[in-house]
Image (cartoon, rainbow, N blue to C red):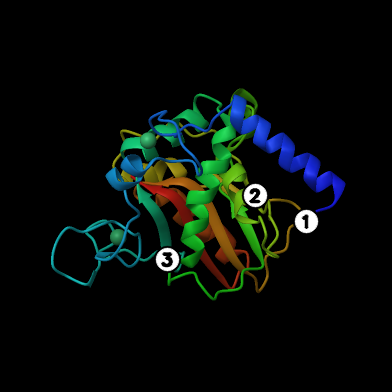
Amino acid sequence: MSPPRIATAVLETLWDLFFPRHCAGCGAALDSGWLCRSCRMAVPPIRDPRCGTCSRPYFGALEKFECENCHGRAFYFQCAVAVLPSRGYVRALVHRLKYGGELWLADPLGEMIRLGLDDDRLAGRNFHGIVPVPLHPLRQRERGFNQAEILARELTRGKETPFFDALRRTRYTVTQTHFDRHQRMQNLRDAFSLRQNVDVQGKHLLLVDDVLTTGSTLDECARVLTQSGAESVCALTVARG
Ligand SMILES: [Zn+2]
Ligand SMILES: [Zn+2]
């Protein structure tokens, strides 16, 4: 080990001694990782059977299915992979990052969203760029950061695929929490556009957000990218609402 490496290892050991790790979900002491076993067991990643388009979990006997959210709907994205259901610690961590400004949660949430790259709908694909769903500049100033950008940057760790800030939010939209699908689509109309001097022609893109609820936001972003010439758009979120 080189001297700087030894110094780092010593520092890390001291750090762990004085600041033992705690589970990001429940605060229990941990030897390693970000989450304790009981939190992980309580909210495991979404597996089949789930909707092949939007990752909505399904508690039935079917292997693959199209959920009622997607039935009869054509999306501009090819698929939307969501790693975990938005409940328990998952919901809490996203909330604490987004509204509590706990930026250190980028690490555990980054680890979670990276699991999505191994999903069989995304594995083996080569993306030209990782595009975050943008916030309106006013909201970004208010919050101080864009959680989708933080997650998109986490996805570039150890990968060659670059972060690609291709979109901007041109309309300040009201919060969609209590809107149905139709109202969400109305609310989002012309909300996004391509940034100036950005070229997406022929590109395969991975669009990133924190939570997928009805897919309307991701779809609207994917529409702008596709109609600007992108060859394909896939989407990835940490959570499925
Ligand atoms: Zn825990
Ligand atoms: Zn679906």
Q: Position of residue 210 (x, y in %)?
A: 48, 44
On the image, which quarter does residue 131 sit in?
Answer: bottom right
**Left or right: where 87 falls relative to 206:** left
150 left or right of 190? right
The residues tagged by marks 3 and 1 sit, at their Cα atoms, a distance apart of 27 Å
User: Are the two marked residues, 2 and 1, in contact with CB atoms closer than 8 angstroms?
Assistant: no
Badge 2 element: helix
Q: Position of residue 188 (x, y in %)?
A: 46, 44
Q: Earlier in the sequence, mark 3 or mark 2?
A: 3
Q: Where 91 falls versus 193 (above or below)?
A: above
Of mark 2 and mark 1, the one earlier in the sequence is 2
The residue that mark 2 highlights is 153
Camera-nearest label, 3 or 2: 2
Q: Residue at left 66%, top 62%?
A: 129
User: Tag 1's secondary structure?
Assistant: loop
Q: Nearer the viewer, mark 3 or mark 1?
A: 3
Q: Is residue 157 left or right of residue 63?
A: right
Q: Nearer the viewer, residue 91 or 200?
A: 91
Question: Of residues 100 and 227, which is closer to you in this image?
Answer: 100
Name the residue at 31% across, 62% down.
47
Residue under circle 3? 79
Q: Amino acid at mark 3?
A: Cys
